[in-house]
Image (cartoon, coloured by chain):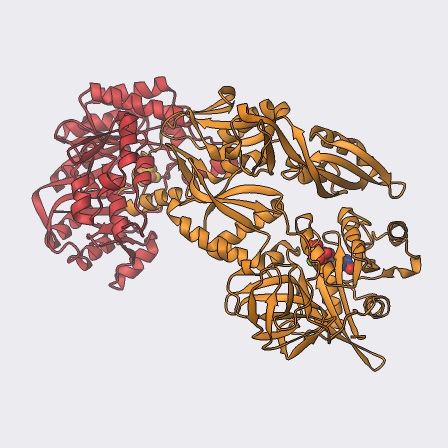
Amino acid sequence: MENIRNFCIIAHIDHGKSTLADRLLEYTGTLSEREMQDQVLDNMDLEREKGITIKAHAIQMNYRRDDQTYILNLIDTPGHVDFSYEVSRAIAACEGALLIVDASQGIEAQTISNLYLALEHDLEIIPVMNKIDLPHANPDAVADQIVDLIGCKREDIIAASAKEAIGIREILDAVVDRIPPPKGDPNAPLQAMIFDSVYNSFRGVEVYFRVFNGTIRARDVVQFVATRRVYDADEIGILKLQQQPVNEISAGNVGYLISGIKVASEVKVGDTITHVDRPGEPIKGFENVKPMVFAGIYPVDTSEFEELRASMEKLQLNDASLVWEPETSAALGFGFRCGFLGMLHMEIIQERLEREFGMTVITTVPSVQFRAVMTDGSVRLINAPSEMPDPTRVDHIEEPFILAQIITKSEYIGPIMGLCMDKRGILKNQHYLTTDRVELSFEMPLSEVVFDFFDKLKTISRGYASLDYHLIGFRESDMVKLDVMLNGDRVDALSAIVHRSKAYDWGRKLCEKLKDLIPRQMFEIAIQAAIGQKVIARETVKALRKNVLAKCYGGDISRKRKLLEKQKKGKKRMRQVGNVEIPQEAFMAVLKID
Amino acid sequence: MAGIYVHIPFCRKACHYCDFHFSTSRDRQREMINAICRELVLQQDYLAQEPVHTLYFGGGTPSLLTADELHILLDTIRANYALQADAEITLEANPDDLSENTLSVLRQAGVNRLSIGVQSFSDAILESLNRNHDARQAVDAVRRSRAAGFTNVSIDLMYAIPDLSMALWEETITTAIALGPDHISAYTLTIEPRTYFGHLASKGTLIETDEETAAAQMERLADLLAAAGFEQYEVSNFAKPGFESRHNRAYWEHQHYLGVGPGAHSYNGVTRQWNISNNPLYIKAIRKGRVPFESETLQRADHINEYLLTSLRTSRGCDLERLRLDYAFDLRADRMTYLENLRNLGLATLHESTLQLTRKGRLLADKIAADLFVSPTEG
Ligand SMILES: Nc1nc2c(ncn2[C@@H]2O[C@H](COP(=O)(O)OP(=O)(O)OP(=O)(O)O)[C@@H](O)[C@H]2O)c(=O)[nH]1
Ligand code: SF4
Ligand SMILES: [Mg+2]
């Protein structure tokens, strides 16, 4: 156990965690040259395509030094705020963390939030200043920032370049020398914490765990404490690039377990694995992840509902953070109300449904979770505009608020304040990290932040702003349900819950946007926005006048048919609501409102 | 019942809008005619000796054919196909070619229907289209045809052209009516890639006529011609009673036809095929005794969709019983709400088993057909 080190790599998005992991794997000879590729741990298609890490990845390395072989269990984590729960899981399985800071960008919002997560768990922090090869790197200033933030000594910071393989040995030595070996008793009753699970269509659910006490052996009979389920440990092993079965894994080490579990929901990340005949105490795990954004997902083709359900179930095997329940919409038929960690997560789920399962889906207007406090004092949770109760029975509505931390250059303070005020934000704190870098803290409604806030923030700060946020609770707000009617029929999937002060503006802009998005049809379409019975905005899509080619085709009828077939294909993503055909983008129009 | 189409791929000059297959270099015209004759022989079994009721010389510009060329083509057809004595024999002609002499050659050869490419009676418009004739020649050509004894004369008109005002369009239609043709085909200008207009449009210097103007001109045309005794028997075709083009009708009713010459299309009930659109390559292949074509076998959905597409454009409409019997497609049952909708919007009527578009519906014929299309997987 003295030779085991468990550590994770944490940082702000894009600061080079996965690339640094590549170098560590390379240096320790964990992968062959043939296996090596950039950000090798980002093995999901979407991760490779988007160039970001979505899921944490664990891998074991052997590092030889002075006749000693050390077992280093590394977990690479994502930097995007939507996936911060992945970071907290990784942290719970480690004794130390490499905190990477980009030498050209300095400390950003997730540097701070992830550092605090690690400190809460008493992890040993090794600060690494990465990308020192960049011509515009600013190592001195960034080193000052790091010293200020962590309270470490300058000499503790390792200057590195994951790209040029600078500082890699220093990092490995620091991991060995500075991170304490795990504590625990291999002979005590088994206590292993599940920190991740992955679904494999051949082998079922693979459970990743960290043993705190005791020893788990292949073919043991084990129990998951929270679910009380009992399994045979068919196979246990360690996580190399490929899994490597072993006979036993003892206190301090990390491994995987395969026991024929077919349903991912049977596995609760954070649960404790123990032996049936000699149970250990459950370890304190961590809270379930809470979805931040809710939206409906519907099949474009109504007959594909069951297929969509099957696809969602499979997706959930891989992504326990996705939650959903069936929902019906008058406009869209049968679908699912889904909870996501954020907009990126939602986008990823939609893309995965389309790519991996060949589904064409419509996503409805995203919404946060509101609370309606009823006149009788009871509280109802509102995950969709359609769940908004009759206003006469509602005492007041509460909406989730967050504390947003924005780090930017001082020259952008003005515009950022403006943006945040516009989003109903309240400035709580302003803290200079250096003379020209400042951390602003706002309390803001989550609903104003989840959609396009980050994009706007990046635009007005020319990219020099980073954002982190966490929920701080619910607050009373004057929210109203804004309905959209097409030719007088309410289209429930287009409704939204908005703050009263913004309802008129929203209604007008939404109608304008829909007018652009809804193609002309055989009849005129009136688009109206209404609060209750009161119409607050109106636009009209004129009827189509002419759609016929008066052209001489001779005997070339196939060409004409193909032309029309092609046009028709282009409209596949249209959804018929009443008589009106609505393109898929229309349901997301709300996101594009300024 | 079958038809034959002969494609004459030569023109004097290129009209700015035209994407038909033709060449303006005519030195190999005679070789081409020989090749087409050879193709006629090679293809003699294509129509399985069905009686041929319509023969159509299109192009290109078939009025460029010499007397000789026309005769050998007709002789070859008569020798190899069951061309009926009362067959409709149409020839497309440009006004500038229709001298008295040419007209009498055509008559003698047996051509009994002329389709004259008038397009406009405005010199400015004709000029802008790069036509090879002026308004005077167009009027004369029609009159001379009559004088030469042609009792079935059609003229082509074109609208939705930039600079064609409503007033000018009305004047064009009135002039056309006054000339007393038996049939009028009227097409909207469509801007095609690989034409001069297409080139201008891609540079942004030519702007396609807007939908509202095109629709208004189309309606005006239908109204004026209706008042003058023409029936709009198809979106672009108008005829005095008894003068509908039998050849076109055969296309829409999916009768069999053989097309010869480069770029020509054929249909035998199972496959559609089309010859290579390249004069030298066509001649070269035919000389080797091979017809250079590509083909496609129509699937059930293709048959249905093509029938929907063509029949909804005609005044006869779409015979739902035929779709049900021939292709096991029960449109009435499968598209009930849509049909209801069309009727409520005044776009279509349904009598017995015939679905017909109204005047307003005809303007949307393509969209309606496409909406009704079946997908290959649909039962
Ligand atoms: N010049 C330079 N570029 C680097 C270095 N390390 C990483 N990069 C680049 O920075 C970008 C982001 O690298 P990643 O390793 O994917 O960053 P990450 O922190 O894993 O990103 P997320 O997982 O999405 O949070 C890539 O384009 C890398 O090539 C470095 O040391 N020098
Ligand atoms: S419109 Fe007729 S004459 Fe003009 S180029 Fe085309 S085929 Fe030739
Ligand atoms: Mg990464």
Residue A225 lies, with reference to residue B327, above or below; the image says below
Could you tell me if residue A556 is visible in this image?
Answer: no
Between residue A282 and residue A476, name the one nearer to us. Answer: A282
Q: Which chain is orange?
A: A
Instruction: Name the side, left or right, on which A346 lies relative to A40.
Output: left
Residue B229 lies, with reference to residue B292, above or below; the image says above
State the count of labels. Answer: 0
Could you tell me if residue B151 is visible in this image?
Answer: yes
Rendering quarter of residue A271: bottom right
Between residue A1 and residue B32, name the one nearer to us. Answer: A1
Residue B108 lies, with reference to residue A253, above or below; the image says above
Q: Position of residue A372 (x, y in %)?
A: 59, 32
| Residue sitting at the far bottom | A67
Instruction: Name the side, left or right, on which A411 lies relative to A495.
Output: right
Q: Position of residue B238 (x, y in %)?
A: 22, 29
Which residue is rendered at x = 22% and y = 56% of the image?
Answer: B39
Rendering quarter of residue A267: bottom right
Which residue is rendered at x = 67% and y = 52% of the image?
Answer: A287
Q: Colour of chain B?
A: red
Q: Position of residue A65 (x, y in %)?
A: 83, 78
Between residue A436 and residue B25, name the one nearer to us. Answer: A436
Q: Position of residue A2 (x, y in %)?
A: 81, 75
Between residue B69 and residue B111, name the one nearer to us. Answer: B111
| Residue sitting at the far left | B85
Rendering quarter of residue A266: bottom right
The quadrant of the rendered image in which ligand 2 is seen is top left
